[in-house]
Amino acid sequence: MIASCLNYLKDFLDSKREIYEPLISAKTGEKSILMLAYYRNNLTHVLINEAEIACSLLGFSLDKDSNQGSSIESLWRKTQFLKNVLSDEFVVRDTMRSQEDFVKIIGFMESRDFLKVNNGMVKVDSQNEKQSLG
């Protein structure tokens, strides 16, 4: 999905070592900024739940080297904290209202190989992470 989005917006982006920046020049700057702002606003609403979960999992890990992950209950609390912090910045329809919704999103993320759930512990699939980086 991300590759499709980047391909669609390639005329508005500049890429250096897989770091993307808005392509701004005197002639096309306004158009690029408007297009990227338009799609950013739409994509944020589509990916906000997964982004909050991923940021909570990776950002609040106390011991990143142990790779034990986080329990589903702990990750739920961390994600709710992050959602509360971001509530002043983002006005989105909350589709993750309950822990049941949260578990469904975790299941979806696991089915797409973003996360791995084992014995109630959620973690980033390190094998998948290495493949995507290398």
Image (cartoon, helix red, strand yellow):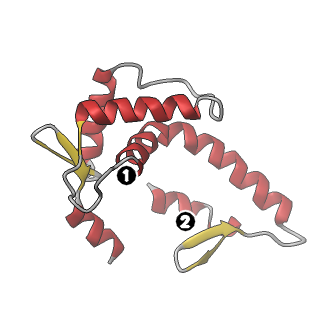
Query: Is residue 44 left or right of 110 when viewed as pictured?
Result: right
- Can you give x and y, in whole percent of width and height, for residue 103 in the image? 26, 30
Label 1, on which residue?
A: 58
- Can you give x and y, in whole percent of width and height, for residue 5 in the image? 53, 57
- Can you give x and y, in whole percent of width and height, for residue 90 in the image? 62, 33
What type is the residue that disc 1 sits on?
Leu
Classify 10 Å Cα crowding around label 1: few (below 14), some (14-19), many (20 and above): some
User: Which numbered disc covers residue 108?
Assistant: none
Q: Is residue 126 above or below residue 17?
A: above
Residue drawn where x is 32% and y is 50% of the image? 62
- Can you give x and y, in whole percent of width and height, for residue 33 in the image? 77, 57
List the single residue furthest toward the top: 98
* Displayed quadrant of residue 71: top left
Image quadrant in which the C terminus is located: bottom left
Residue drawn where x is 28% and y is 34% of the image? 74
Query: Is residue 55 left or right of 132 when viewed as pictured?
Result: right
Q: Nearer the viewer, mark 1 or mark 2?
A: 1
Label 2, on which residue?
A: 7
Query: Is residue 19 left or right of 133 when viewed as pictured?
Result: right
Classify 10 Å Cα crowding around label 2: few (below 14), some (14-19), many (20 and above): few
Q: CA distance from mark 1 to mark 2?
A: 27 Å
Count of numbered badges drawn on the protein: 2
Residue drawn where x is 42% and y is 50% of the image? 59
Q: Is residue 36 above or below residue 119?
A: below
